[in-house]
Image (tube, grey):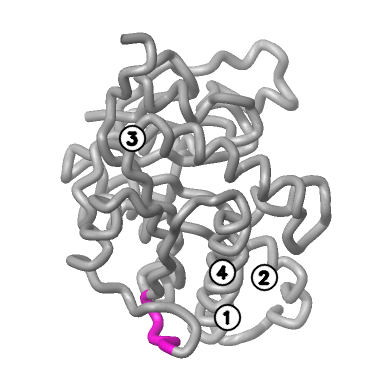
Amino acid sequence: MADQPAHKRVLLKLSGEALMGEDSYGINRATIERIISEIAEVVALGVEVAVVIGGGNIFRGMAPAAAGMDRATADYMGMLATVMNALALQDAMRRMNLVSRVQSALNIEQVVEPYIRGKAIRYLEEGKIVIFAAGTGNPFFTTDTAAALRGMEMNVSLVLKATKVDGVYTDDPKIHADAMRYKSITFDEAIIKNLKVMDATALTLCRDQKLPINVFSIFKAGAFKRVVLGQDEGTLVHC
């Protein structure tokens, strides 16, 4: 079948910056709706989708105030920003008739559920989208690392890193016109060449657990669906 997915359960890592669109910070409504329409296409295939969301779009607006701030304090502020993004994502999904649940690694029970692995897996099995907020709940760890961790805990077969570029290149394609896209690359190559796929902790976690990562552009129409269908889209990072 042409539309037979290659993966039953995946985790999508969305940066906060992806929600900004062309704005300098915050959430662009048209952009978030377009991203959710991409997610809806994948859900319609019967694929179970978990999402880890970053907070850069909100924290960027606070960056001047955070200069010189204690790192742990700044990281907790960033985690709270991801909760705001997760709630915005959930509400936009509701308006597009997608059922989702938000689970937070920080306990804010009046606002969102706490992260409970068994409940998250059950939601996925029921066809609900699960949005993981607040990273790992610990300072000094990025949302990339949270994506790797939640991907393993949810037993997904693929982590998808959504970016503004359609894969991993030999050089910055915006600066170097002759830069070539890697169709696939090993974890060790990505680490040695410092290709900025994800941070080193996330890459090492995925490598050790043999959990592949596909880097693709969330702004390229249909790219998320093509990755899930196993087509040549973006860059596959594997063991």
Q: Earlier in the sequence, mark 2 or mark 3?
A: 3
Q: Which residues are magenta?
A: 105-109
Amino acid on which the number 1 mark rests in the picture: Met
Looking at the image, residue 191 lies above or below residue 236:
below
Question: Do the residues bearing badges 1 and 2 touch, measured as CB atoms within 8 Å?
Answer: yes
Residue wearing tag 1: 77
Quadrant containing the N terminus is top left
Q: Position of residue 31 (x, y in %)?
A: 72, 46
Question: Do the residues bearing badges 2 and 3 touch, measured as CB atoms within 8 Å?
Answer: no
Amino acid on which the number 3 mark rests in the picture: Gly
Residue wearing tag 4: 87
Q: Secondary structure at mark 4?
A: helix
Residue wearing tag 3: 46
What residue do we see at 37% from left, 75% from top?
A: 105
Question: Do the residues bearing badges 2 and 4 touch, measured as CB atoms within 8 Å?
Answer: no
In the image, 47 versus 50, the foreground residue is: 47
Residue wearing tag 2: 59
Question: As drawn, is 55 to the left or to the right of 52?
Answer: right
Q: Secondary structure at mark 2?
A: helix
